Image (spheres, grey):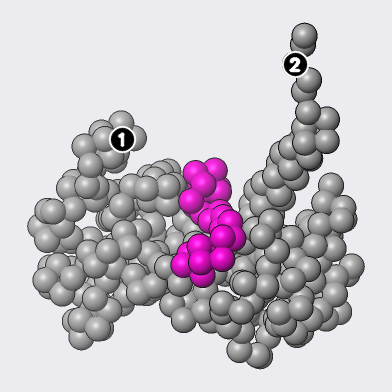
């Protein structure tokens, strides 16, 4: 249970509704900032403006999946106000407070470090990233079906990157009967793709490998689908870029070439927000409860220190 814990949500999307419900179910005291457009949909919470006074009472601050942009702006799907997290607000947090987000940009990392506030990035955890790869891959398949006039079965598909999302996506495509090639950078990834029965290649050879592809899925956050590479991609092909903004594709040149290229970050929040929210809620609440247990044990040790035997 989270009884007595003061939890503040600053911005968020549909995934955060599940986290909010889980926190209230566990008896946390929840205050929402930037959720004024959904007053009647959430029970057992209070709403507030963004103030230093509110931050001074917070034990846990939960931010959107991408905590802030490079200037501190915080996105909220349920607010028309501009939310900016700055030094004054973070400096108002109690020293024991923790900040949770999915991915933290340098601005947020520096902000928390300057004030000695612990920052937890949920997507840096393997379990969250693996679970999250499922709605991401399903969303990518949905986009491919919606934007092509062929079946995935029998199509020539390429997945760039064999991280957690790439691995899940390549496996799904293979099970659907697609002809799958995977671009990797490391020998162990090459070996894993071979073990799966998927044709691997090294991304340094991408220029030669993209010929005759129907669908290209990119998960690599670097600029990998350059103008030079795109000159080799058939006009009928489609690129679905799953990397975080700005993606790994030269979208301007792709459009000039008449190739449809779609940037699709944060797919879990769009195609399966309830599932994605439950993944985050379960992990986040588990971490909070573990932290509370550790603190309680430490408090007990301070109150009742061990007396050495004589």
Kindly identify the residue that appears in the image at 51 percent across and 47 percent down: 125
- Magenta span main SS: helix
Dot 1: few (<14), some (14–19), or many (≥20) neighbours within 10 Å? some
Above-or-below relation of 22 to 255: above
Dot 2: few (<14), some (14–19), or many (≥20) neighbours within 10 Å? few
Q: Nearer the viewer, residue 132 or 146?
A: 132
Describe residue 184's horizontal placement relative to residue 46 as left or right: left
Residue 21, position as x, y percentages in the image: 80, 61
Q: Which residue is mark 2?
A: 308
Q: Which residue is mark 1?
A: 192
Q: Which quadrant of the structure image shows residue 230?
A: bottom left
Q: CA distance from mark 2 to mark 1?
A: 54 Å
Q: Please check the rendered image and state whether residue 202 is part of the magenta-colored stretch, yes or no.
A: no
Which quarter of the figure is the C terminus placed in? top right
Residue 31, position as x, y percentages in the image: 79, 71
Q: Nearer the viewer, mark 2 or mark 1?
A: 2
Residue 195, position as x, y percentages in the image: 30, 31
Describe residue 178's horizontal placement relative to residue 72 as left or right: left
Is residue 150 at least partly visible in the picture? no
Above-or-below relation of 172 to 273: above
């Amino acid at each position: 249970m989270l009884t007595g814990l003061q939890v503040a949500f600053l911005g968020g999307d549909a995934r955060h509704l599940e986290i909010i419900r889980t926190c209230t179910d566990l008896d946390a005291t929840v205050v929402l900032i930037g959720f004024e457009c959904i007053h009647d949909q959430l029970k057992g919470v209070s709403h507030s403006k963004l103030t230093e006074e509110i931050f001074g009472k917070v034990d846990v601050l939960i931010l959107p999946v991408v905590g802030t942009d490079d200037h501190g702006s915080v996105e909220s799907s349920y607010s028309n106000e501009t939310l900016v997290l700055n030094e004054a607000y973070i400096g108002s947090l109690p020293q024991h407070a923790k900040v949770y987000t999915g991915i933290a940009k340098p601005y947020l990392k520096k902000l928390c470090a300057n004030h000695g506030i612990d920052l937890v990035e949920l997507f840096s955890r393997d379990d969250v990233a693996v679970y999250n790869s499922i709605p991401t891959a399903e969303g990518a398949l949905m986009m491919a079906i919606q934007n092509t006039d062929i079946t995935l079965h029998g199509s020539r598909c390429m997945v760039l990157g064999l991280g957690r999302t790439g691995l899940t996506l390549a496996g799904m495509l293979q099970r659907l009967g697609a002809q799958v090639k995977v671009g990797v950078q490391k020998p162990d990834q090459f070996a894993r793709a071979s073990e799966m029965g998927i044709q691997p290649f090294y991304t340094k050879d991408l220029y030669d490998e993209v010929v005759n592809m129907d669908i290209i899925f990119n998960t690599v956050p670097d600029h990998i689908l350059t103008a030079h590479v795109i000159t080799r991609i058939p006009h009928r092909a489609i690129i679905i870029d799953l990397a975080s903004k700005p993606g790994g594709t030269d979208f301007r040149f792709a459009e000039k070439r008449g190739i449809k290229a779609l940037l699709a970050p944060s797919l879990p929040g769009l195609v399966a927000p309830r599932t994605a929210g439950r993944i985050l809620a379960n992990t986040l609440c588990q971490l909070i409860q573990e932290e509370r247990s550790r603190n309680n044990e430490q408090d007990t040790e301070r109150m009742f220190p061990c007396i050495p035997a004589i």
